[in-house]
Image: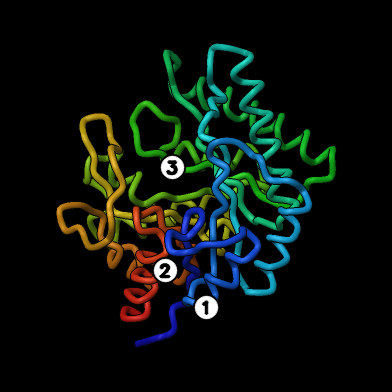
Amino acid sequence: MGICPHRFGPAGKPIEFKGDLADIPAFLKSIGLNAMEYEAVRGVNIKKENAEVFGQKARENDVLLSLHGPYYINLASPEEKTVQASVRRIYESLRASHWMGAYAVVIHTGYYGDLNPSEAIRLAIKGYKEALEQAWSDGYVFPSVSPETTGKTTQIGTVEEVVKICLSLGKKCRPTVDWAHIYARTKGELIQKVDDVIKIIEYIESNLGKDAVSPLHTHFSKIEFGKGGEREHHTLEEELYGPSFDVVVKAYKEVGVTGTFISESPILEKDALLMKKICEDIY
């Protein structure tokens, strides 16, 4: 068993934790985890003082924080009020992340609708720039915005699209790579082999530089898919579903990048710990 160089943690409050937000980092450290994604998926409702205390406790316990922004975002909507509400939600996510010291703000960019992908991406980039400029003008400069690879074919978020967005936004953009989403979106064609993962990592690094993969912000679980892509997340031990975590970790080891692995499994921290064990066995 080797030393695993990656960070692991849950998406949101651990299922076995009972207590206040500020006490979660100590709990995670006590069970052997060192990352967490704060879930603001139904709105950014955290107060400044609570975010600052949470962030301080995370730093004291060596827990790296990220934040997942609201699901109700569509930067390519034909409705201007929807776009402006989306920009506002990204701004609020950046502000809360700055307060708590979260390094990445994970965003589902939106939907193509009736637009062709290139036009949808153009509108998305415009909206991201507006949110970032507002955040920077108010002094919220710490976090990176982190567009996520998405699991449904109706959603903006192929690997290539995420990289294109980040190229347009510059250094304050880093991709969130959800390996389960890529697997579901391609109906299981990708993330079957170590080489599938290596090609994606190398594509990101060659386009966005070393910082984008130091660490590479990552979501993982097993996943069920249908004709349109993602259906439902599953646990690592459910053999009917993919992808294999072993495949992903072996690729990271081969190319020598570090990752922050956020468990989106239904059993959150339990599968984060299983990922860590698999990683230690491989390294």
Where does label 3 land, which residue? Answer: 149
Q: Where does residue 126 sit, x and y in percent of width and height?
A: 65, 26
Pick whichever, 209 or 177, lies toward us: 177
Quadrant into which the C terminus falls: bottom left
Where does label 1 land, which residue? Answer: 30
Q: Are marks 3 and 2 in contact (CB under 8 Å)?
A: no
The Cα atoms of the two marked residues, 2 and 1, are separated by: 30 Å
First along the sequence among labels 1 and 3: 1
Q: Residue at x 61, y 20 (%)?
A: 83
Q: How crowded is mark 1: few (under 14 residues within 10 Å), some or many (20 or more)?
A: few
Q: Looking at the image, is 60 positioned above or below residue 110?
A: below
Where does label 2 land, which residue? Answer: 255
The Cα atoms of the two marked residues, 1 and 3, are separated by: 31 Å
Q: Looking at the image, is 81 positioned above or below residue 219?
A: above
Q: Where does residue 146 sit, x and y in percent of width and height?
A: 57, 46
**Lateral position of residue 138 relative to residue 39, left or right:** right
Name which residue type carries label 1. Ser
Q: Looking at the image, is 134 positioned above or below residue 224?
A: above
Tag nearer the camera, 1 or 3? 1
